[in-house]
Amino acid sequence: MAQWTKTSTGEKVYEITIWARGVTQDMEGRHLALLLSKAADKDGKFTQAWDNYADLPDRVGVPLRKYARISDEEIEMRYAYENSEPNMSIVMDDTLVKGIDVLRGMPKGGVLVVNTKRPPDEILKLIPNKELLKTIVCVDATGIVGGTGLEGLDFMGSEGGVEAASVGAGISAPLVGAAAKATDRVKLENLVAVAGNKAGVKAGNKTAVVKSL
């Protein structure tokens, strides 16, 4: 069963924080949050997906966050604009783990998913608070989709607009596939159904390396 965060309102909410690079990964980070929420919605869950207003995604390379929440109950903490206790952290660029606390606020028993060619043990050496983790998942999402990872680059905001590109056509697809190996909050078949790159979701799920701690 998934770990839950019991919030100050008493809700049980599964919180997912996505770490990405400004501009270059802004769209795929947004898509990652949308895929997770759309897949859970297909199972009748209550969901949210949004940007972090405190970050600076308009600056190239600046670390930024996206968020998703999944719950069996209506989410009353709708106006809390950050995930204070993420149960899962997804890192879209493995260089981020070298200087940023990507497990910020995570309760013990969390999950870390990293887009990397490196094995879990090598990534764990860079995580100072790895005792918080129950599971780490590594997947070469960039290698699965091919190219530089910038082919889907856009400068759209995520608030109040319609996506011009297919949701989940890039590295977000294999990353959500990998995430599905470590949580029961989203089902692989639902992720495949809502993603533009269905083969990418399946490949990410198949090739992801999972290490239990």
Image: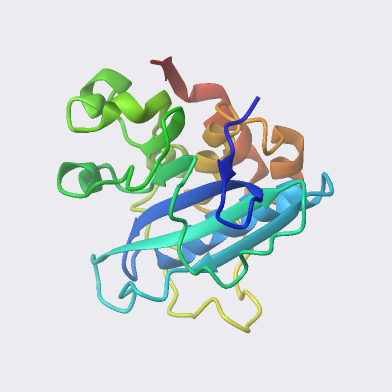
Query: Residue at left 56%, top 23%?
Result: 206
Q: Compare residues 194 and 148 and report the one nearer the observer.
A: 194
Q: Compare residues 70 and 171 and report the one nearer the observer.
A: 70
Quadrant including the N terminus:
top right
* Percent coordinates x, y for residue 86 in the rendering: 46, 46
Query: Residue at left 45%, top 32%?
Result: 110
Query: Residue at left 42%, top 37%?
Result: 107
Q: Is residue 175 left or right of residue 108?
A: right
Label total for image = 0
Query: Residue at left 37%, top 37%?
Result: 114
Quadrant including the C terminus:
top left
Q: Compare residues 174 and 4 and report the one nearer the observer.
A: 4
**Seen from this angle, which residue lies furthest bottom?**
160
State the colouring used for the structure image. Answer: rainbow
Q: Is residue 118 left or right of residue 77?
A: left
Q: In this view, does 137 lie to the left or right of 35?
A: left
* Percent coordinates x, y for residue 52 in the rendering: 43, 69
Task: State whether residue 185 is above or below residue 172.
Answer: above
Quadrant housing residue 143: top left
Does any portion of residue 52 appear in the rendered image?
yes
Quadrant housing residue 64: bottom left
Task: State whether residue 64 is above or below residue 123.
Answer: below
Task: State whether residue 189 is above or below residue 59.
Answer: above
* Percent coordinates x, y for residue 190 in the rendering: 76, 42
Does any portion of residue 195 appear in the rendered image?
no
**Seen from this angle, which residue lies furthest top?**
212
